[in-house]
Image (cartoon, grey):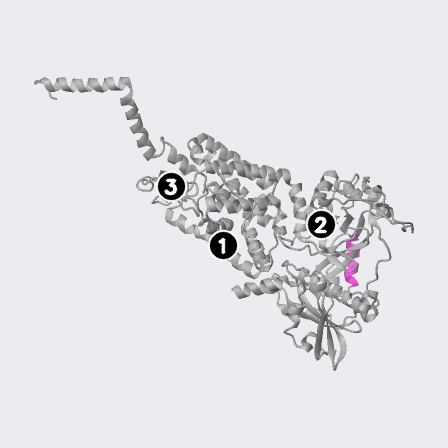
Amino acid sequence: MALGLYATVVLATSNYTLPRFIGSMAPHEAFPDADRLGNLTGAPPVMKAFRDGEPVGYVFLNSDFVNSTGYSGQPIHQLIAIDREGVIRQVLLVEHHEPIVLIGIPESRIIRVLDEYVGLDIGALVRKTDGDHQVDIVTGATVTVMVMDDTILRSAIKVARRYGLGGLQPEPGKSGPKATVNMELKQQEDWASLLGEGSIANLKLTLAQINEAFEHSGNEIAAARIEEGEPEEIFIDLYAAVVSVPAIGLSVLGESEYRNLVKLLESGQHAIALAGNGRYSFKGSSYVRGGIFDRFQVIQGDTSIRFHDYHHKRLRRVAADGAPDFRDVDVFRIPPELEFDPAAPWKLELLVGREIGPTEKAFLMFDQDYRIPDKYLIFPEPEPAAAADTSRDALTIPDPMAEDAPLWMKMWLIKLPEIILLLIALGVLTVIFFFQDWFVKRPLLTDRIRIAFLVFTLFGIGWYANAQLSVVNILTVFNSLVSGFDWSYFLMEPLIFILWGSVAAALLFWGRGPYCGWLCPFGALQELLNRIAKLVQLPQVILPWGLHERLWALKYLIFLVLFGFSLHSLGWAERLAEVEPFKTAIVLKFVREWPFVLFAIAVIVPGLFIERFYCRYLCPLGAALAFPGRLRMFSWLKRYKECGAPCQRCGNECMVQAIHPEGNINVNECLYCLHCQVVYSDDLACPVMIQKRLKRERAAAYSSTDGRQQVEQIIADLRTRRETPNEAP
């Protein structure tokens, strides 16, 4: 295991991946006509292939040149060989982690698609003298094949231009200063003006146009399966705009949404908005946590941009005056590392599929070109030959927070009010736990504080801030430890980071109870709903101890399964982690596809009758926290020797049955609600405390004046009776 982890870390820290694959391959495997491979040259690296001492071509890895991240969230590595005429001679799939290929579609089907690239002339493709390139998409692996196709072509074009292959020239240098976006222009326009000037681009396709396109595609089956309906019915009416440009963003999004977007954008990062109507949705419904939108991509130059679900935000409407109502309105943030230039032209490629069999589809691509209007650009004038201006007015000092500071710092500043409020709440909770002996002697105050805190957790931490921890966070941390840990990734969500810090501290003092019992929004939702259920007198079910104790094991088994899957594929583990209804119930507030909503309701409803049902038996996060919770340094929950034998008061009243019949508290299951400590200190509820109270009352009665007189009178009466022979003593 140690050697394996070491190898993983070493590979993860390498700048380029080609050496890892090429070293163990024979020359003819990498290049069909080669008998020898040369040394690595350039950055990214390329290896020359030789035959009889003469160079015949070049070998490179797609992922060294372009972003090849697939559906799994990890790169798809393909080894590509290209000859000196710019013709591809070999494409090998050397490593991938795509789940649909690993467990569903046979890899041989993907290999057959790659074989079709052999003989492709990259120079002719760029010059468009050899017809349009069509990708043979494998149904069920749309994203995977699109990524593979896109990265093969774009990496091959980069290599061909670097070495002048196939008549392509190296990338031309910049001919001077380029146009930039005028960030000071913020005049808002109505919908008609935006559309008329080209700030919003439009792609409209009717059923007739779609049917005609498939008819000319050459696929007879696809052509025969026409879209039923009126020919002029809208198939898709799609609009696109760069909303990180202030004037366009303010017009399309409105002031409030534009401000929210700016807070999320890193320096130099941009975003586009898409809005659509019609029979066909540009979004589709197959994207999930960590998934990719597979029906469209943005192309600018040799860069292709695909969006994950964490890049996007759904909006209710377009804010511009006169804008129509749209079925889909979404904003997509472009990853900053892709260096998108809003002043340069780009296009949106829309993928449309049509079923041609039970498991097969035919696909067509439709382009929507976009170029920002000149009114939003600043075109630099040639600099005069005079000496540079060294006056005070010519000096500019960049804003360090806008230019130099990492994005996570910006996120902490943006969320500073929420951070302060959360820290105050954590401080209050810490005071409660450290001074719990004082609080538990005031049952009504303790109960009211608990209800108020649960309401804050649900509405504030959960539904407002979306700061719901998940077992996925734990799996991600473990994965990052073996593949290259980076603090900045985890600092991006300040509230999540602070909560995990509080969990780590609480585990040392009290175990998992403080988070699970007080800070988990889904747990708060369950407990508050159960309190309402009790108010309306819904019957409460108490499971037999033997069954209850065995059901505890379910959540540990679920966690171990997720952990095992994460060792193989973090993407798969994230999908299986939907066993947590947190995303549906808390983050998305039940606005999701019906299977997820149905599952969330299915685990909430039993909690109306069995308090904290999900926490007790199914929660993998609670199971994960229970393991380090065993290392706690203190045991502050007090017990009497009479607890459990014979008294069962606390055990019967524990909301999650965490107290064993013999009286000891199972800290792995305890949610630290403090109810047992309230009973422990209550001289009207705890039998031990009741006896102590009665003794105090008897002692107090004897110590009073009236009490002493009554006792003396009784003693005098007893003496009188003893001295009287005719009366019994």
Residue 544 position in % (x across, y down): 38, 46
Upstream in sequence: badge 1 or badge 2: 2
Element under label 2?
Answer: strand
Element under label 3?
Answer: helix
* Residue ID for mark 3: 651
The residues colored magenta run 204-216
Between 587 and 222, the one nearer to me in the picture: 587
Which residue type does callout 1 highlight? Ile
**Between marks 3 and 2, how big is the CA–CA gap?**
52 Å
Query: Would residue 48 be found to the left or right of residue 504 on screen?
Result: right
**Between marks 3 and 1, how big is the CA–CA gap?**
27 Å
* Residue ID for mark 1: 558
* Disc 2 packing (10 Å; few <14; some 14–19; many ≥20): many
Which residue type does callout 2 highlight? Arg
Tell which residue pokes out farthest to the right in this image: 385
Which picture quadrant has residue 104? bottom right
Magenta span: chief secondary structure: helix
| Residue drawn at x 87%, y 46% as measured from the top left | 389
* Residue ID for mark 2: 333
Upstream in sequence: badge 3 or badge 2: 2
